[in-house]
Image (cartoon, helix red, strand yellow):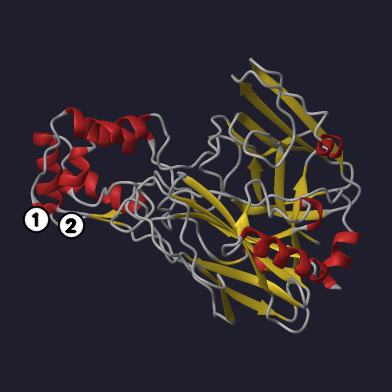
């Protein structure tokens, strides 16, 4: 099979995979922080006079920033718990907005400054943050509607075409007794021949509830076990948290993922991920019920497939194999700043296109780096303020190349305020230190 053949040729140990979770809200086609995040009206002199006299105003300065960076999630019917699409709505929560943007909790882009350059950077610049905070501190002037600017539309790449769609087999109503409901739904792959998936697009049915969707891949032999697990649960799908549940993560590849604001469409740089006939897709859906808008959900994913691919790719999990037995990645009770790291020397050349990090709720910081054989270091991804709720894959502006002799390294840090020692595991009270990288043959 195409996918198994590729995995057998890989130089990095095929450990196990957890997908790219959470994504940032409201990405725009231009990187966050650029001066062209909004289009001005023609009356430049009037706008300059207004800013000099009043300072920032809603219509001229703040509204376009909300539209460019916030309203894809913070609007009626979306996953954000309150709207930020009108003057009145923002005014009500203005103190929270000021605190969130100053602390860089929002927009939720966790990649640290200075690591490397990524596509679709949704961050606010320092000047933009200052504008929002100054507007709030100065009394939230509404300004002149005739001088209104409009934020750049959210970038929606989409697929070149949709070959078919997969949806949850039946609608599922999330468990509203919990704020977070993680549910896995097994779906048979419908294509009767081996193909390459070259792009996907998630269509959340209940946007106010669906926090992320991950598509895992399981070999045909797991179909019976998956259906048995669902039957035992008694509801559509089955409960899962750290991964696809029934299947050991070393046996489940990742095909695609979505979170609010994520850029969707074709894989970067012509990459195609092999998909074998007879396989199963496990759709893990994270439902967040904080907004209290519970309803039946039947989310779907559109796929584009090809018989050939420009670059044969896969999502490569990266972690220390010795951690997987649940005993050697100890995070002692009551200890802060616990660190574990792992490195691996490459034995062949590969191209890499994106990087992602994954920990659970005790995570504090993590990074993946590449030390070239010549001695230089390249940062792939660094997160200094880990937040389990906002995880995403970061696509490099330009692909990077791993060469024989290069050393790939991952390091994670945790604070454990509990009275229980913690180690590697899939559960909500366990932890992980896992990288995942979209790779391809050169």
The reply to whether the C-beta atoms of the residues labelled 1 and 2 are less than 8 Å apart is: yes
Q: Residue at x 81, y 57 (%)?
A: 251
Comparing labels 1 and 2, the label whose residue is closer to the camera: 1
Q: Residue at x 70, y 67 (%)?
A: 227
The answer to whether residue 374 of the structure is visible from this angle is no
For disc 1, the neighbor class at 10 Å (few under 14, some 14 to 19, many from 20) is few
State whether residue 340 is above or below residue 177: above
- Residue at numbered disc 1: 146
Compared across the picture, whether 357 is left or right of 264 comes to right
The answer to whether residue 145 of the structure is visible from this angle is yes
> What's the CA distance linking mark 1 and mark 2?
9 Å
Tell which of 188 and 25 is nearer to you: 188
- Residue at numbered disc 2: 41
The C terminus lies in which quarter of the figure?
Answer: bottom right
Find residue 84 and report its horizontal and vertical position in percent. Answer: 26, 48
Compared across the picture, whether 212 is left or right of 18 comes to left
For disc 2, the neighbor class at 10 Å (few under 14, some 14 to 19, many from 20) is some
Compared across the picture, whether 374 is left or right of 426 comes to right
């Amino acid at each position: 099979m195409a996918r198994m053949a590729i995995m057998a040729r890989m130089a990095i140990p095929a450990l196990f995979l957890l997908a790219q979770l959470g994504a940032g809200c409201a990405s725009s086609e231009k990187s966050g922080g650029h001066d062209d995040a909004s289009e001005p009206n023609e009356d430049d002199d009037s706008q300059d006079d207004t800013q000099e006299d009043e300072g920032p105003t809603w219509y001229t300065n703040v509204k376009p920033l909300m539209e460019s960076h916030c309203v894809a999630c913070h609007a009626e019917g979306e996953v954000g718990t309150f709207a930020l699409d009108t003057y009145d709505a923002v005014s009500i929560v203005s103190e929270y907005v000021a605190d969130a943007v100053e602390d860089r909790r929002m927009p939720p882009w966790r990649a640290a400054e200075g690591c490397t350059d990524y596509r679709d950077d949704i961050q606010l610049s320092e000047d933009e943050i200052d504008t929002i905070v100054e507007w709030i501190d100065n009394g939230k002037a509404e300004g002149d509607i005739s001088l209104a600017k409009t934020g750049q539309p959210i970038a929606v790449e989409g697929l070149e075409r949709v070959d078919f769609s997969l949806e949850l087999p039946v609608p599922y109503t999330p468990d509203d007794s919990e704020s977070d409901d993680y549910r896995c739904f097994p779906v048979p792959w419908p294509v009767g021949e081996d193909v390459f998936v070259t792009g996907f697009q998630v269509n959340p049915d209940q946007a106010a509830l669906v926090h992320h969707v991950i598509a895992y891949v399981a070999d045909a032999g797991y179909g019976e076990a998956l259906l048995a697990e669902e039957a035992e649960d008694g509801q559509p799908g089955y409960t899962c948290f750290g991964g696809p549940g029934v299947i050991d993560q070393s046996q489940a590849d990742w095909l695609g993922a979505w979170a609010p604001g994520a850029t969707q469409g074709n894989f970067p740089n012509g990459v195609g991920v092999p998909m074998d006939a007879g396989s199963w897709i496990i759709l893990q859906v994270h439902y967040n019920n904080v907004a209290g808008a519970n309803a039946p959900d039947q989310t779907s994913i559109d796929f584009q497939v090809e018989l050939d691919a420009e670059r044969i790719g896969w999502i490569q999990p990266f972690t220390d194999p010795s951690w997987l037995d649940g005993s050697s990645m100890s995070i002692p009770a009551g200890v802060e700043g616990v660190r574990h790291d792992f490195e691996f020397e490459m034995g062949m050349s590969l191209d890499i296109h994106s990087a992602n990090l994954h920990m659970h709720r005790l995570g504090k910081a993590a990074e993946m780096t590449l030390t070239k054989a010549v001695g230089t270091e390249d940062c792939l991804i660094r997160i200094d303020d880990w937040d389990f709720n906002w995880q995403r894959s970061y696509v490099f502006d330009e692909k990077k190349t791993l060469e024989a002799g290069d050393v790939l390294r991952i390091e994670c840090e945790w604070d454990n305020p509990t009275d229980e020692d913690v180690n590697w595991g899939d559960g909500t009270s366990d932890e992980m230190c896992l990288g995942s990288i979209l790779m391809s043959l050169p």
